[in-house]
Image: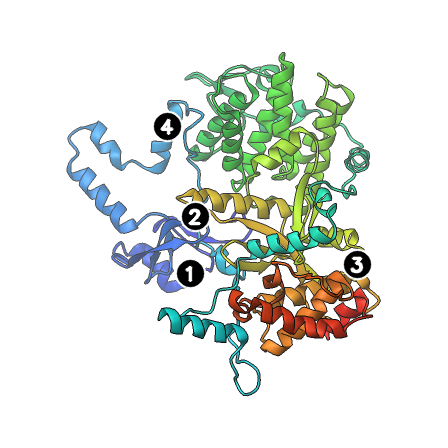
Amino acid sequence: RQDPRTGKIYYYNPKLKQTSWTRPDNTVTAASTDPNYGKGAWVARVDPRTNRTFYFNTVTKMTSWTNPDEDEEKEKMAAASAVSPAASNRGASLASRISKRISFQPKADDQPAYEATPAAPTNRTSARASIRLGAIPTANAAGSRLSMADVARQKKANITGEFQAEPETPALEDRFAKLRALRNRANPEAEAYEDEVQERQIDLEDLTAQAMAEVNYDLPFQAYAEEFLNFRRKGWGKKHVPLERLITWKPDRIKSSLHALGDPALVHDSILAFTNILCYMGDKSSKNPMANAKKIFRITVQCPEELRDEVYCQLIKQTTNNPNPSSCLRGWELLVICAGLFPPSGKLEKYLLSYFRRATDQEPYPGIAKMAEYAMLRVQRTIELGARSEAPTELEMMAVREISPVTVRVHMLDGSITPLEAECWTTVADLNSAMSHALKIRDGSPFGLFEISNRDEERALEDEDRILDVIAYWDRERQLAKRARDAPTFQFVYKVRLFFDIKEDDVRAVEVAYHQAVHDVTDSRYPCSEDDCLRLAALQAQQRFGDYQDGVDVFGDELQAFLPAKYYHPDVEDDLKAAVTETYKLLKGYDEQEAMNNYLD
């Protein structure tokens, strides 16, 4: 079989109800004839991506979301206690259980019946190549003399009788706040531009025009319906439903899927999706339409292709001859979001694009034509790149309503923030390119985008990662937190990834590398003696404040931003300032670029 999320082939044993990424050997294959093979060998483990418990068989090397030993025991108990046909149904098959659920018509807040057959759960955490930040333990300068801060700690210990441990490096968010305060002191107007995109990176008007030009055909949806939809769907006799009724808007729920789906679980979820579509569009009352939209995307984000086609056709149906302008517009919002989330199948693709193209020419209500153009662009990019791995966030859904890109804030190690635009197709490589363009870096190859959390964990993002999927993953991680205070926070940080030689005349590249070096030194990530740190702090002051001026304390109460935490102590702050200033005076005449180059050397 093929895993719909990754496209990888896996192997399913219908006897054992187990799956494997690799083809089982003859021993495992033969086990299907031995009902006792692998019994009692199931152990519980936790999938780090979803925090769900799964079970691994140490004999057969198979995985399952449920414990087969316990399931068998429950079936035996159910069979033993059976006193009537109704009781015997407890051990019925999955298909019959789901069929009963379908016959009752699922409510909008029901859970999806379909889950991809549990293949070996992937460890997303290890795949994210996380590393722990923190101080690098190093010796002091030659002779291992104590630093001024260490002396101050020992004195305090002698007085109080309590030893003071070396302070931890401040959290990255706190350091960013201090760096921003320093930078804004020199340039008070800088922060005002950090929430607005200064230059449009994504020209939607031009891109939609190109997308429309590529659709030079017109295939009526009726032709697709006649070939692929299920017309026999009414009552016990499965009476034939007229074509027009099947593909046009209806105000109430459907009783079966539009396609003839063989899997009862898919049929159940298709009805559940349609119910939530009605709720979001306002055709059925709902307390929380946004929750209905999220349920639709939860159903479809990693589902089989046939269910995705089903949802596309349901949305076409509900936006065709819809008498309510508001309902129709909200249906198109769902179409646009789906278009940026997963591609249609090859058999539906041209019919779907034709439907979008006709809506731009035959606009049923104001605003629909723009939505249709946007949907056409998004679905073409999704066909090109493949399905997304995460359901969209509310932030993305709100941006779709406005037909606007999502604004992404990228942090720099000097505390500055650069706002950039991202769409459903924007990859990390795209944002890296936009970032180097925004910063006017000539050669952006040494730099890259990182994800950094408040738990002091970071990973270098892969070029093919979708930016909005990364943000959706962050949102999902926050929702998994049991308490709000335990919820992780994340941010994009642009910094050096590959330590190539940077040309000195690439001024902005040198500046980014310099701020990386300052960060590594002051964050105790680079082994450095106290004397070296004091000299580097002087170069940092020269770069930031220019030539030394008598009687001016340029450091104020921010000296901690210039030194590693282990070399700072408030009791010796004046001595530290004096030591830094002594070197700072000697740097008179160094311009900003020279100070940075000397720091890097």
**CA separation, marks 4 and 3?**
59 Å
**CA separation, marks 3 and 2?**
38 Å
Quadrant hosting residue 464 = bottom right
Task: Identify the residue at image location x=66%, y=44%.
Answer: 408
Q: Earlier in the sequence, mark 2 or mark 4?
A: 4
The quadrant of the image that shows the C terminus is bottom right
Considering the numbered disc 3 on the image, is that residue within a helix, a strand or a loop? loop
Dot 3 and dot 2 residues touching (CB under 8 Å): no
Answer whether residue 155 is visible to the viewer in this image.
Answer: yes
Dot 2 and dot 1 residues touching (CB under 8 Å): no
Question: What is the three-letter code of the residue carrying label 1?
Answer: Pro
Question: What is the three-letter code of the residue carrying label 3?
Answer: Ile
Give the foreground label among 4 and 3.
Answer: 3
Mark 2 neighbour density, 10 Å: few (under 14) some (14–19) many (20 or more): few
Give the foreground label among 3 and 1.
Answer: 3
Residue 55 image offset from top left, x and y in percent: 34, 53
Q: Earlier in the sequence, mark 2 or mark 1?
A: 1
Question: What is the three-letter code of the residue carrying label 2?
Answer: Asp
Considering the numbered disc 2 on the image, is that residue within a helix, a strand or a loop? helix
Identify residue for label 1: 24
Given residues 79 and 317, the one toward you in this image is 317
Identify residue for label 3: 441
Identify residue for label 2: 486
Residue 431 image offset from top left, x and y in percent: 70, 51
Identify residue for label 4: 101
For residue 571, above or below residue 466? below
Given residues 397 and 52, the one toward you in this image is 397
**CA separation, marks 1 and 4?**
34 Å
